[in-house]
Amino acid sequence: MNHDWQQLRSQMPVTEQWAYFDHAAVAPISRPAQDAMAAWAADVAANGDANWSRWRKGVEVVRRDAAKLLSAERAEVALIRNTTEGVNLVAEGFPWRPGDNVVVPSGEFPTNLFAWLNIKDRGVEARQVDAQLERLDLDAVKAACDSRTRIIAVSWVGYVTGWKNDLDALAELAHSHGAYLFVDAIQGLGVQPLDVSQTPIDFLAADGHKWLVGPEGAGVFYLRREHLDLLRPLGLGWNSVQPTGDFHEMPMNLLDAAARYEGGSYNMAGVAGLGASLKLLASYGVAALAERIDDISEQICQKLKRRGARIVSCRERERRTGIVSFDPPGNADLAELLRQCRERGVIVNHRGGHMRVSPHAYTNDDDIERLCTALDS
């Protein structure tokens, strides 16, 4: 199926000023997200809570669309503020016993490390497996596991080089040790295919402000239905029980769904924005988005190599993503190079001592040329 990528581009206002290559950090929001958030703000400013129930029904539409993205049941999805919240729901809610351990790769983003280090006072060891340039070796993970391993916690896609882990293999490894697999999915969700009905991960968290081109402060938490009562529920509030909204007599009858973790009031503007971007991307399909981003990132790699850059990211077909890290020729000052690119209307970043570009499906040839010109300068 041929897609009109120019149409997607027209829904990204950022293109009017910038050649944007930093979706692995904070993405620009889509025009539908902008419009949805503005509509909520205008409504609340004019009407207070008169239309609150309409926006609350919209939350369930977003939950449905998020579940569809994952091929999950709606009851398996909670709408959360950020990836960190999702990691901590598992780290703090899991029924640990002294002597247990969690296995996590070295070089993880702090979100998927600090939460596991923080439970040391509960007698839980965080075992870090060496993963140079995020290249996680399954044999090394296996060697770190034993009979007291309870969770393997990994990023689906690494934030420094974009290395994509094999979630099927990791789930099989975890389950063979009687452990669970937690996935920080923020660098892949929405633009890399994932079907949790086929890939049996146990827990997942992802914010919407990167590849989902949604706003900060709205994300997705997934847990497999059979694990609902495994975790001690945290952050409980009026929104965690049923019936919801009967404040006079409200027994602590927890929702039989992941929504029990949503606790209190929603970030309605953020959820509305996230939902609008989910619908926009769903109209293209994850597989098409993944293929388009792969083509763009490969073009960038070829142009960079012709300029003498060293590609740091693994570009093997099964491992590569839209994150391309590279070392420019010479002994470039990365912060200065970033500044000079910005002066020329090009947004890039650097991580782990390497320059990093992360295009999206709406990136076009003109953007790539602007990037190359900026780097040449």
Image (cartoon, grey):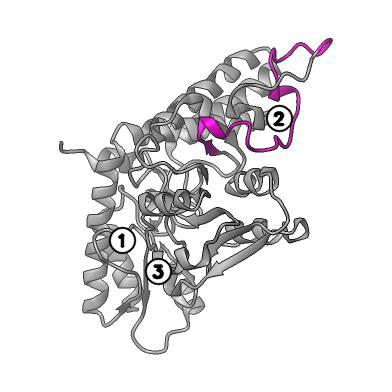
Callout in the foreground (3, 2): 3
Identify the residue shown where x is 57% and y is 47%: 83
Front position in the image: 157 or 338: 157
Identify the residue shown where x is 34% and y is 33%: 282
Distance between the alpha carbons at the discs numbered 3 and 2: 37 Å
Q: Which residue is mark 2?
A: 263
Q: Earlier in the sequence, mark 3 or mark 1?
A: 3
Front position in the image: 308 or 40: 308
Q: Earlier in the sequence, mark 1 or mark 2?
A: 2
Characterize the local packing of mark 3: few (<14), some (14-19) or many (20 or more) Cα atoms within 10 angstroms: many
Q: Which residue is mark 3?
A: 135
Determine whether, in the image, residue 1 is placed left or right of residue 41. Answer: left
Q: Amino acid at mark 2?
A: Gly
Seen from this angle, which residue lies furthest bottom? 331
Determine whether, in the image, residue 58 is placed left or right of residue 51. Answer: left
Q: Which residue is mark 1?
A: 320
